[in-house]
Amino acid sequence: VATDCLASHQILQPLVNFVVCQLFALLAAIWFRTYLHSSKTSSFIRHVVATLLGLYLALFCFGWYALHFLVQSGISYCIMIIIGVENMHNYCFVFALGYLTVCQVTRVYIFDYGQYSADFSGPMMIITQKITSLACEIHDGMFRKDEELTSSQRDLAVRRMPSLLEYLSYNCNFMGILAGPLCSYKDYITFIEGRSYHMTQSGENGKEETQYERTEPSPNTAVIQKLLICGLSLLFHLTICTTLPVEYNIDEHFQATASWPTKIIYLYISLLAARPKYYFAWTLADAINNAAGFGFRGYDKNGAARWDLISNLRIQQIEMSTSFKMFLDNWNIQTALWLKRVCYERTSFSPTIQTFILSAIWHGVYPGYYLTFLTGVLMTLAARAMRNNFRHYFIEPSQLKLFYDVITWIVTQVAISYTVVPFVLLSIKPSFMFYSSWYYCLHILGILVLLLLPVKKTQRRKNTYENIQLSQSKKFDEGENSLGQNSFSTTNNVCNQNQEIASRHSSLKQ
């Protein structure tokens, strides 16, 4: 009994530390916005305080393992300085991802296997994203020619080398060190320097001229709404998830006695119950950034302030997804953008496969991650082929489209659940037990779809990519509020993130 209590304490303690630190960060964010507002103090002070608070939280939550954050950031900064802008993005990518992988291997095979909640490699995953993103942005801004860049790359390009303080502040600030989300370097610096509300307009000479500074809206309403979502998500997770474990899908008695409809329904419900913990962590992280004044995107067509610049998910769209594309558009948004910016856009050979492999490596070394992402490649390609070959038959009339939406919602939710079971189970044996109990049916079906249906070749020309972005921008300007739209820029150099998502998945699904 004493051993069980000790093991339970060892599992819960990191999680409790994480929640306590995030709640402290929320209070610190309110104080930071109130007393260290950009109108009241210098950018230098804001950088110093944000960095020191972040390192303090990391030290409290992870102990001396937090030194890994400084080591990874410090060596990456030295690489940028020494190697130079031509190749530093490649060296930073290899080092940061390699260092992360070494830490993940150490955690999995030295510490208790499977106890991954609130471990120190979690923040390192976010820091790795920031290191590699910034290296690419500096490479784009200081080495590549503007005509070689896409419009989003031009918007994100960094034209000068950050100072060490700016670099550490970006990587280790208290708002995002524990759970992110990822943000672009230019967005973060714009926030620290207080330029998030400066509006610009082209003057007669064609140059941009600052016309006025828009009144700063209060984030309080957005923060309260997101905290309510956090509370409901945590309650759902604590009450429902424990009664509907994913592991029950591979229970021998359940597999032997349950009918196929029961298996399908339980698979969906158990994976549905596993999602609220991510909703809780990501929404709380978003609320912390908003409370500090970071994350303002602008105003919608009704004049309401939008605080979703760095939001990581859209719950309603996730749960109502009728395609893999729609699910990926709205789940872990900032990571999807990172994969696109550092991998999908920059590779010419099998970009979809390489992107999924990078995603698996970044997530960790559990075999279940690789099974999930390899299955995800097959599901994505099969879903693309099905959509391209059949969707146009169900556009009209509206009743037929409704029928199509219902069927594709069911298929998508089952396929997503089937794909991510190994991600939750982690180990190779239980993952294969699950797939074998389903006779690998969706794998076989996906392969048959790819073999039997014609697949359109993906065109990844630069001008096509930019035309998609311009088209999406026009739609927003005309006030069309399409599902999952996330595209309004309020600073001189904020990138239109939803255009990136749309263009990424337009390319992936063609």
Image (spheres, rainbow, N blue to C red):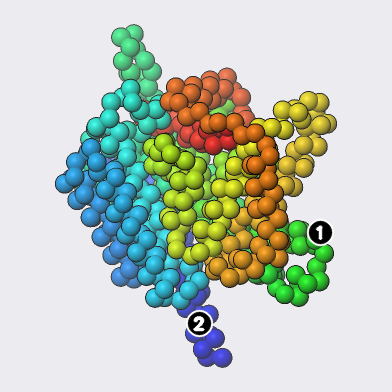
On residue 209, which mark appears? none
Residue ID for mark 2 = 7
For marks 1 and 2, give the CA distance: 37 Å
* Identity of the residue drawn at 28% across and 65% down: 67
Residue 51 is left or right of residue 118, and the answer is left
Say what secondary structure mark 1 lies in.
Answer: helix
Image quarter hosting the N terminus: bottom right
Q: Along the line of sight, which residue is nearer the eye, 103 or 282?
A: 103
Which amino acid does the dot numbered 1 rest on? Pro
Q: Is residue 357 above or below residue 2?
A: above
Q: Along the line of sight, which residue is nearer the eye, 118 or 364?
A: 364
Residue 478 location (% of width, % of height)? 57, 19
Say what secondary structure mark 2 lies in.
Answer: helix
Which amino acid does the dot numbered 2 rest on? Ala
Residue 208 location (% of width, % of height)? 33, 18
Residue 290 in view in this figure: no
Q: Is residue 125 above or below residue 456?
A: below
Residue ID for mark 1 = 261
Residue 489 in view in this figure: yes
